[in-house]
């Protein structure tokens, strides 16, 4: 999904950095921190990329038949799905 690509990569990289920092501080690998930070960061990136920086890009997706609510719902569901996958690791 083109919409989620702009969100997933930066959120995953930043959540891995936070996981590495948590490992450096505690000495234990915690995928819980990575998963929670990924879900939260993906929502924040969604807001900043599509609501603040490029609000007119919603028109492109609206012309494809996707409303803002569909995009937010898909973003939240995909983020939770990937967060659950990270928790299972």
Image (cartoon, grey):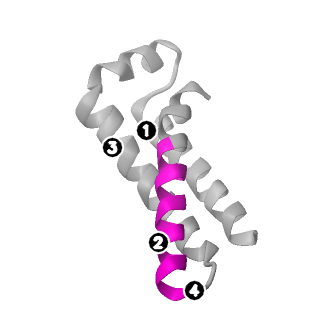
Mark 1: which secondary structure? Answer: helix
69 sits left or right of 79 in the view: left
Q: Earlier in the sequence, mark 1 or mark 4?
A: 4
User: Where residue 27 is drawn, which disc sits there?
Assistant: 4
How far is the residue under mark 1 from the one under mark 4? 41 Å
- Distance (Cα) linking label 3 and label 2: 25 Å
Residue found 45% across the figure and 42% down from its top: 72
Q: Which residues are magenta?
A: 10-27
- In the picture of the structure, the residue carrying the numbered disc 2 is 21
Closer to the camera: disc 3 or disc 1? Answer: 3
> From the viewer's perspective, is the residue at label 2 or at label 1 nearer?
2
- Give residue 48's mark: none
Counting residues from the start of the chain, the first of labels 4 and 2 encountered is 2
Image depth: mark 1 or mark 4 in front: 4
Q: Is residue 85 above or below residue 66?
A: below
Q: Are marks 2 and 1 in contact (CB under 8 Å)?
A: no
The residue singled out by tag 3 in the image is 47
- Of the residues under marks 3 and 2, which one precedes in the sequence? 2
**Label 3 crowd bin: few (<14), some (14–19), many (20+), radius 10 Å:** some
Image quadrant holding the C terminus, namely bottom right
- Please tell me whether mark 3 sits on a helix, a strand or a loop: helix
Name the foreground residue: 75 vs 17: 17
- Pointer 1 residue: 69
Residue that appears at 34% across and 33% down: 50
Mark 3 against mark 4, which lies toward the viewer? 4
Q: Is residue 1 left or right of residue 38?
A: right
Real-space CA distance between mark 2 and mark 1, rounded to the nearest whole angstrom = 34 Å
Q: Earlier in the sequence, mark 3 or mark 4?
A: 4
Residue 88 is inside the magenta segment: no
| Cα separation between marks 3 and 4 | 33 Å
Q: Are marks 3 and 1 in contact (CB under 8 Å)?
A: no
What is the magenta segment's predominant secondary structure? helix
């Amino acid at each position: 999904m083109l919409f989620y690509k702009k969100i997933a990569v930066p959120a995953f990289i930043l959540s891995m950095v936070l996981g590495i920092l948590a490992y450096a501080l505690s000495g234990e690998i915690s995928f819980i921190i990575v998963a929670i930070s990924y879900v939260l960061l993906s929502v924040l990136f969604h807001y900043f990329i599509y609501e603040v920086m490029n609000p007119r890009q919603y028109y492109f997706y609206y012309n494809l038949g996707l409303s803002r609510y569909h995009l937010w719902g898909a973003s939240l569901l995909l983020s939770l799905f990937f967060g659950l996958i990270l928790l299972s690791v």
